[in-house]
Amino acid sequence: MIYFNEKTLEFHLTNQAMSYVFRVMDQTGTLEHLYYGSTIPHYNDFSFLIEREIRPSNNQVWGNNLTSLEHVKQEYPVFGTTDFRYPALDVEYPEGDHISQFVYQSYRIFTGKKVTGALPGTFGEKDEVEVLEITLKDHYSDLLLVLTYHLYMDEPVLTRQAKLINQGQQAVSLHQLASLSVDFPKGNYEWLHLNGAWAREAHLTREAVHLGVQHVSSTRGHSSHMHNPFLALCQPDTTEKQGEAYGFSLIYSGNFLAQIERDNYDVVRVQLGINPFQFNWQLKAGETFESPEAVMVFSESGLNGMSQTFHRFFKKHLIRSPWKDKKRPVLINNWEATYFDFTEEKILEIVDEAQQLGIDLFVLDDGWFGHRNSDTGSLGNWTENRAKLPHGLKNLSEKIHEKGLLFGLWFEPEMISNDTELYDQHPEWVLGQPDKNISHGRNQFVLDFGNPAVVEHIFEQMTQILSNVEIDYIKLDMNRYISEAYSNMLAANQQGEVCHRYIIGVYDLYERIVKNYPEILIESCAGGGARFDAGMLYYSPQIWASDDTDAVERLSIQSGLSMLYPLSTMGSHVSAVPNHQVARVTSLEMRKHVAMFGTFGYELDPTKLTSKEKKAVKQDILDYKRYQELICSGDFYRLETTDENQVAWMVVSQDKNEALVGYYQILARPNPSYERIRLLGLAKEKEYSVSEGDKKTVRYGKDLETIGLILNENYIGREQEYWSRTMPGDFHSRVFHLTAR
Ligand code: DGJ
């Protein structure tokens, strides 16, 4: 429900689970933020929420001592009118100044949300989402600022977006247009974010919000391995299971900024949007610029509550692929099996073996095109490599389909190698200043996807393959960072637009693929998880989580991603040992137990498995398929463990009649303590049969939550077994399946 009080000019956006209140300030016409959190009753007058002290040493916008914006919690702050914190909007005017003052003009309330324009976003029917659109006008120019709030009715979710319209006669330079800005009152806050590097993405960090500015961001052209366009704010006593949490996610895959600023009066400002670093957009007369959309989630049931809301919300209102609710095929990808070194014969051997194992889909990764036998060339030449595949892709796909498997293919559309005809014909299509050095990354250069002709050309090339070969799945990769963001197509004063135009071009390509080949399952990827973000999920229902396939490493990566991304979006595969990234040897069982909490697959050469392993893999695939529905549609919980040596995950079906628990112990300890894992999300009064392989016990939901699963053995009466027991050793995992009786 969205209330507007004509008298007090207050807006109250509220549903069963959250309230958000702001008002128009009488003297300045600025929007003042009043409240965000748990649902509160609607008041005819929210003025009791206004906090205003007379403080010496402030600048006043006008007249009296009460018009300083320095201590006002604002909805969408600008710099240059007495607030000295970081702004949400930064416009440079033709005169060279950055002084804006946006004054409230009007509002509009309507229902339903569609995605229009060049950026991905959320969608909802008329009975699912209510929209508030507020228009403000710049006191000094003909710029209009439109702030949009989408209140989803059945979830504690609000999404926000900003739009700047130039109704004047002259261009302005837009340096920043944040997607959201929220000022929180004084409190004891901590913040969470995901960080890492290649092969160790999405590690969760939780730290105190300190005075001053702290942020995570990307300047690399995509959301990056280093940080994720996400942050959460919570209290020190918020746990997985209880307490308040506010989650913020940006639906964007390019350079972003997620920033927190705690000022000297302890007001905490959270902002999310395109990274203003070197961003400079020429907003010409008559033009409009739209920010990406940002999602705000409020939880009163801890971090799991926040994550589950994100999961449900993304599945229902962001991911649009017809695959989103379908069972995903169990795939095998040849990358770690062969790298570039494969022949048609070798591929068919892998496929034969995969068929025996019960795998559904074979994915041919990098190396099938041009003359690509290493990572030194051929990107941008998307024609099949007949030296490797003498009978061509079409024939290969037919053979694979005849064997009953689906066929998938890898592309890296945004890249170009300097040994291609395309590079010779169109050197101006490469990002970089031609008179200066242009760095390569993995021996490749970045195509200027901000240029529509480039997108058109690459799509045309892809079409030749996608329309002539029966392809069921594509993996779209992106393996380097943008270092010299310069486009030959743009004027000197537009070079600050390159990175944003680039990502719009990427979205354009994805959109064309989705529209023209709606049945193809897309898995996006960027050197592993460098573009694991909500923007990509709009086009691809699954994303390759990391190039690190080691089961232990994946515990941190998948736990981190699960903060906001559903399990059904996480590409996770069983690979060979010793693992190719860390040389660790883990059991096949543990690798399976980790990979099954995601979109399950294999990334190894099945012809090299022993017959015992093949037998196990066959069974593992059957087991996974048995639980697949539960894993992909159930509620996911990160369970609390007593130390960092252990990780535990759980999925509970919507009707609470079935659950799966994964327990992982990293290193073995001598003479260990007793361990219990308290479960979550079960029906307290229900009796569950808990099975681990052949072992079965019966327990009530209530005591599984309060006492937990007891993980140690009970040797009373079987003392002699103690001396002959098999020790599980390092990297040990267990899976428990629960069914209500
Ligand atoms: C990076 C991806 O993450 C890998 O899975 C693989 O596709 C390689 N690129 C191929 O170059």
Image (cartoon, rainbow, N blue to C red):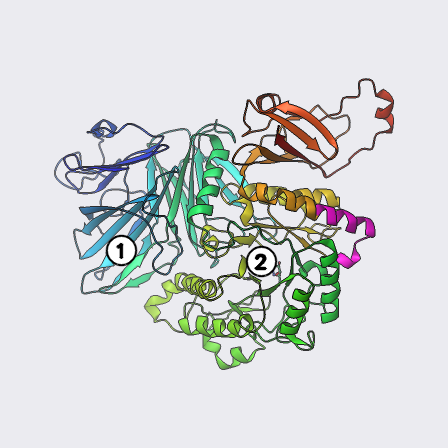
Judge whether residue 610 is colored magenta: yes
Q: Position of residue 461 (x, y in %)?
A: 52, 74
| Residue shown at the point (22%, 64%) measured from the top left | 286
Q: Amino acid at mark 2?
A: Gly
User: Which residue is the extreme one toward the left?
Assistant: 63
SS category of the residue bearing label 1:
strand
Q: Amino acid at mark 1?
A: Leu
Q: Tell me where the magenta segment starts and ends, as one range.
A: 605-620
Label annotation for residue 527: 2
Q: Quadrant of the C terminus?
A: top right
* Point 60% across, 65% down: residue: 409
Distance, label 2 to label 1, CA atoms, is 34 Å
Answer with mark 2 or mark 1, whichever residue precedes in sequence.
1
> Picture coordinates of residue 212 (x, y %)?
39, 39
400 within the magenta span: no
SS at circle 2: loop
Question: Which residue carries the number 1 mark?
Answer: 164
Query: In the image, is 47 to the left or to the right of 385?
Result: left
Q: Nearer the viewer, residue 515 or 141?
A: 515
* Residue furthest front in the image: 741
In the rendered view, would you say 129 is above or below 394?
above
Q: Position of residue 533 (x, y in %)?
A: 48, 51
- Taking the view exactly as shown, the residue that stands out farthest to the top is 717
**As rendered, which of 49 and 388 lies closer to the eye?**
388
Q: In the image, is the residue at mark 2 within 8 Å of ligand 1 by its beta carbon? A: yes
Looking at the image, in which quadrant does ligand 1 appear? bottom right
- Is any atom of residue 595 visible in this view? no
Quadrant in which the N terminus is drawn: top left
Front-lying residue, 452 or 272:
452
What residue is drawn where x is 40% and y is 61%? 500
